[in-house]
Amino acid sequence: MSDQKITQVRGRAIPMPGDDIDTDRITPARFLTALTWKGIEKALFCDERENTPDHPIDNPNYKGAKILFVGKNFGSGSSREHAPQAIKRFGIDAIVGVSFAEIFAGNSLAIGMPLMTASAEEIQKLIAHTQKNSETEYTADLETLTLSWGDESLSVGMLEERRQSFLKGTWNILAILRANLPQVREVAEGLPYMREFQD
Amino acid sequence: MSERTLYDKIWDSHIVAQLESGQYQLFIGLHLIHEVTTPQAFASMKETGSKMAFPERTVATADHITPTLTKLRPFKDDLAESMMSALEQNVDEFGVRFLNWASGKQGIVHVIGPELGLSQPGMTIACGDSHTSTHGAVGSLGFGIGTTEVGFVLETQTIVLNRLKVHRINVNGELNKGVYAKDVILRIIHDLGIKGGLGNAYEYAGKVIDEMGMEGRMTVCNMSIEGGARIGYVNPDQTTFDYLEGREFTPKGEAFERAKDYWKSVASDADAEYDQVTDIEGGSIEPMVTWGINPGQSVGISENLPDPKSFEGEDIKTAERGYEFMALKPGDKIAGTKIDVAFLGSCTNSRISDLREGARVMKGNKVNPRVRMLVVPGSQQVQAQAEEEGLHEIFREAGAEWGNAGCSMCLGMNPDKLVGAERSISSSNRNFIGRQGSPRGRTHLGSPATVAASAIEGCLTNPADVVGD
C-alpha cells in the first residue's frame, strides 16, 4: 500500500478566515440527497458563495490551490462526510487550521486528506500573506511537520497517530480492519450483551 | 481495577487492536443507520462484493428526508424518493432489520434507539449522524461517524479512533421551576463554549442530572456535539434501569438481572480520575434561547443581548456576524423578538415528555395568528402515545400542525423548511446559517415550553409568563 503514502502536499493556498465554519455552511443539507459523491464539490459553500461576490472559493487568484487555510473549530456540527468530500473533490489536498472538529478530522483521515494545526496568530499571518500574494507556493510536509514557502517556514502540529497513518499509507484502513476480523469476533464473544446476557 | 471512568471501561472492553499508526480499532456493539449517510457505503460494498460482518447488529430507519405531513409514496421530491428506495433495496439485499412506517416503530434514529431498548449501558453505538451522542444518556458511548466509517462498521463492525479525555460536568443543586434539560445543556455550551469539548468526552453528573428523567438526559447528551464533545454520557443508575425494563430489545427475566449487574459495573468508579471537572449551579440556570448563529451564542430569556466586545479574538467577529445575520442589536432584550415559525420536534426534543410540556403550555391557548407552528413527534410510538393522551388535539385546537415522525424542520432535508428570512423558535439543536432549509432563515433554539410560549405570544417568551409558574 506504499502508493497510498502521503508525505507532502505542495501548491498554492485558499485563505478562509473565520472560526467555527460548520458543515452546514460547507455543504448545506439540501445537497445531501445524492446517492454518490460525484459532483458534491458543486455544493461547496454554495449558499454563501451565492451571497458573497468575492468568496475565496470563487476568487480566480486562488484557482487550482491545493491547500486551505482555516481558523478554529473548522468542520463543526453535522457528521456529514459530504463536507470533506466536497473540499477534496474541489481539489484541496490538505487543510491547515487552528483546530478541527473531531468527526470532521476522522472523516478527513478516512478519505486521505491531512489536517495540520498552527497557532491563531500564525494562521492569521498566513491568511493575510496569501490574500496579498496568492501566487505563493506552500509545501506542507508531514515528515518534518513544517509548512514552508519562499525562505520561510513554520512548525505545524498533527495528531501523531493520524500523521503516522498518512506517512505509512495506512489511512485507507479498510483492508487492515478486515484482516483483524478474527480478533473482532473474539472481542464480540467477550461482551455480555452480545450473548444477550444468557450466561 | 478502580479509578476508571465509564468511558475508560467501555473503551477498554471494546478494543480490537492497536493499529500501526497508534490509533485503536474499536468494536461497535450497535450500528444505527438511516437513508442519508449510507448509500455511498452500501454502493462501495456492492462494487467490491463485500459482506456485512454482523448484519444482526445494524438496525435501519428513515428519518431525515421523510415528509411529515403525508405518507404517500413516491415522495414528491425525486431525489428523496430515490434515497428512500436505495435504503429499502440495501436493507433487503444485506438482510438488515428495517424499522419502517409499516413496522410502527419508525422514527428519528436517536429517539427509537433508547425507546426500543436497542441502546443499552456499556455498549459502543455508532451512527452516521453527529447526534449519536444522545445514546450516552443510557450509559453507552455513542459515536457520530462519516460515511466511509459507516462502511467500516458494515464490513467489520469496527471503527478507528483516538482516545478522548474525560471532562466531568457537575450540575449541582436544584433547577428552578420552568427550567428544563434543554436550558441546562444550552447553559453548559454557553459557559464552556462550542469549542470547549474538542478532544473530550463529557460526563454529566451532579444532583440535577441524577434527578433528571431519561428523556431529559437524552436532551443533554444530544447536544454534547454542539459543545464540541463527540461523546457525552450519564452514568447508568436506577433511573436508567427503570427506563429500560420491559422495552422490546431489553433482556427479560433473569437475563435482565444479569444485565443490570453488568450495567452497574460500567459506571464510573467513585474515585475515577478526570482530566477536567466543571461545576455549574443548577439554581442559576434560567430558560435559555440562542440569539446568534451557533448554539453557544445564547442568553437567559430575561437578559439583554451581549456586547460583541465582551468576547475574545475571532469570537468578536462571530458575534458581529451573528448580529448581522439575525438582525438583532447588542443591548436589546431577547424576550419580545417577533417570530414567524415555531417548531417543536427533532432528536433533541421530540419525546413524550417534551410534547407533554409543550401541550401543558399550549392548553387553552391559541398559536398567534402570525405564527406557523409545527409539532412533530420523534417516533411513531411517541406519536401513538401522544395521541392516546390527546396531546395532538391540544396542539391542533391551538392552531398548530401535527406531523408524522421524522427530523422535520431541524435540517431542511424534507418539505418542512423555513422560507426566505423567516425567524423561528425551535426545539432542535442547531441555529447555523441555513440550517432550517432557507439560506436566510433565522433560528432561535429553546426548550419545548419556550417554543410553545413563544408560539402563543408571537415572540420569544419565558414559558413562566404564560403558565404562571
Image (cartoon, coloured by chain):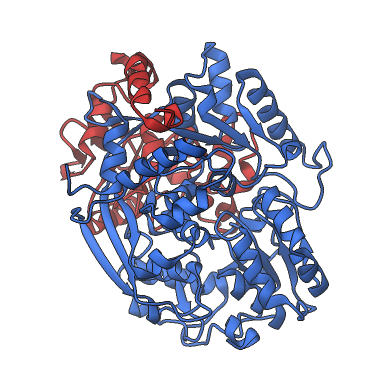
Q: Position of residue B150 (x, y in %)?
A: 48, 31
Visible residue check, residue B9: yes
Q: Position of residue B161 (x, y in %)?
A: 32, 35
**Residue A85 in the figure: left or right of residue B437:** left
Q: Quadrant of the N terminus of chain A?
A: top left
Q: Position of residue B2 (x, y in %)?
A: 17, 46
Q: Residue furthest front?
A: B254
Q: Splitting the image into 4 quarters, where does residue B187 fall? A: bottom left
Q: Up-down: is A117 above or below A195?
A: below
Q: Quadrant of the C terminus of chain A?
A: top left
Instruction: State the red chain.
Output: A
Q: Up-down: is A20 above or below B28?
A: below
Q: Up-down: is B421 above or below A45?
A: below
Visible residue check, residue B436: no
Q: Up-down: is A198 above or below B451?
A: above
Toward the viewer: B177 or B275?
Answer: B177
Q: Splitting the image into 4 quarters, where does residue A138 fall? A: top left
Tell me the colour chain B is drawn in. blue
Q: Residue at x 71, y 54 (%)?
A: B383
Q: Position of residue B281 (x, y in %)?
A: 33, 77
**Residue B201 in the figure: left or right of residue B117:** left
Q: Residue at x 51, y 42 (%)?
A: A80
Total number of numbered discs in the rendering: 0
